[in-house]
Amino acid sequence: GAGVSQTPSNKVTEKGKYVELRCDPISGHTALYWYRQSLGQGPEFLIYFQGTGAADDSGLPNDRFFAVRPEGSVSTLKIQRTERGDSAVYLCASSLIWEDSSYNEQFFGPGTRLTVL
Amino acid sequence: AQKITQTQPGMFVQEKEAVTLDCTYDTSDPSYGLFWYKQPSSGEMIFLIYQGSYDQQNATEGRYSLNFQKARKSANLVISASQLGDSAMYFCAMREGDDYKLSFGAGTTVTVRA
C-alpha cells in the first residue's frame, strides 16, 4: 500500500515569508507526527496528533510554528515569518496506536527540505 | 539531559564483516521501547528493529540484532555480514511510557568498503 507522502519535496523561500508543508499519512493510521531534522543531526520532535487534535505540541519551537489535521488524516505544518534557522528537513510520520504497548512503529515520509534564504 | 547518546559519529566496515553501533539511553520510566532506524542518502527513515523494555530476549531481524543490556542502559545494534547497501546513517530512538513521540540520538554514519 501507499506509504507516508509529503509535499513539496523541496521548498525554497525568503526570510519573512509564510510556508505550508503537507503530510499524507498511511490510510487508517490515527497518529501523525512531525519532526525536524537539521543537517547532521537526529530528528527532533515537533508535534503529535491523535485523530484531529494535537495531543502533544511541546516540541514546537515558538508561536511561528503551527500544525493542523482538520479531518484526522492529512496534516499541514505552517511556519510564519520564516527565519534562516528554520532551514531543515521536516519529516512526517504516522502510526497505529496500540494501547499498553511501547511498540507503535512510526512510518516516515521522505521529508520536505526547507531552505530559507 | 540527552535521552539517547550515540558516541560514534562515523564508522568504516569491510564488506561481509560485522559492525556494532553503540547506543545508550536515559529514562526513569520502567516501560519504554527502543528503535533503530536507517537513513540512506535518499533521506527516508527506514525502521530496522525494536526492543521493548520488558522483552526477555534480544531482538533480531535478519542481519540486524540488538544487544540489549538493561542494567547498563545500552541498546547496541549489530549488523552482520555488511553489504555495500548498508552504507547510511543509523539512528537510535526511544519512546517512554505513555509518551508516543520518539527521542532520537545524533546518529552514526556507517560506510561499508568493498
Image (cartoon, coloured by chain):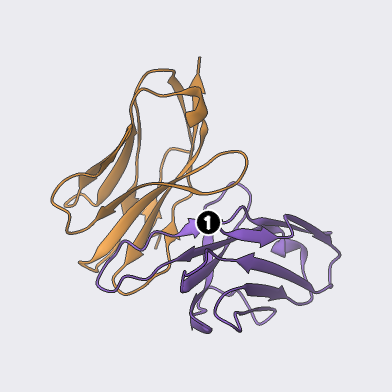
Chain colours: A purple, B orange
The percent coordinates of residue B56 (x first, y second) are: 13, 51
Classify A29 as above or below B105: below
Q: Residue at x 40, y 55 (%)?
A: B93
Closer to us: A34 or B104 = A34
Classify B25 as above or below B43: below
Judged left or right of residue B39, residue A23 is right
Check the picture and name the quadrant holding the N terminus of chain B.
bottom left
The percent coordinates of residue B78 (x first, y second) are: 32, 34
Q: Residue at x 45, y 23 (%)?
A: B83
Chain that bears disc 1: A
Closer to us: A27 or B112 = A27
Q: Residue at x 80, y 74 (%)?
A: A18
Q: Amino acid at mark 1?
A: Phe
Q: Considering the numbered disc 1 on the image, is that residue within a helix, a strand or a loop?
A: strand
Taking the view exactly as shown, the residue that stands out farthest to the left is B56
Judged left or right of residue A11, residue B22 is left
Quadrant in which residue A7 is drawn: bottom right
Classify B29 as above or below B79: below
The number of callouts visible is 1
Bin the neighbour count of mark 1 within 10 Å (Cα to Cα): few under 14, some 14-19, many 20 and up.
many
The percent coordinates of residue A17 (x first, y second) are: 84, 72
Taking the view exactly as shown, the residue that stands out farthest to the front is A1
Judged left or right of residue A65, residue A92 is left
Pointer 1 residue: A108
Quadrant in which residue B25 is drawn: bottom left
Q: Residue at x 70, y 75 (%)?
A: A78
The percent coordinates of residue A82 (x first, y second) are: 77, 70
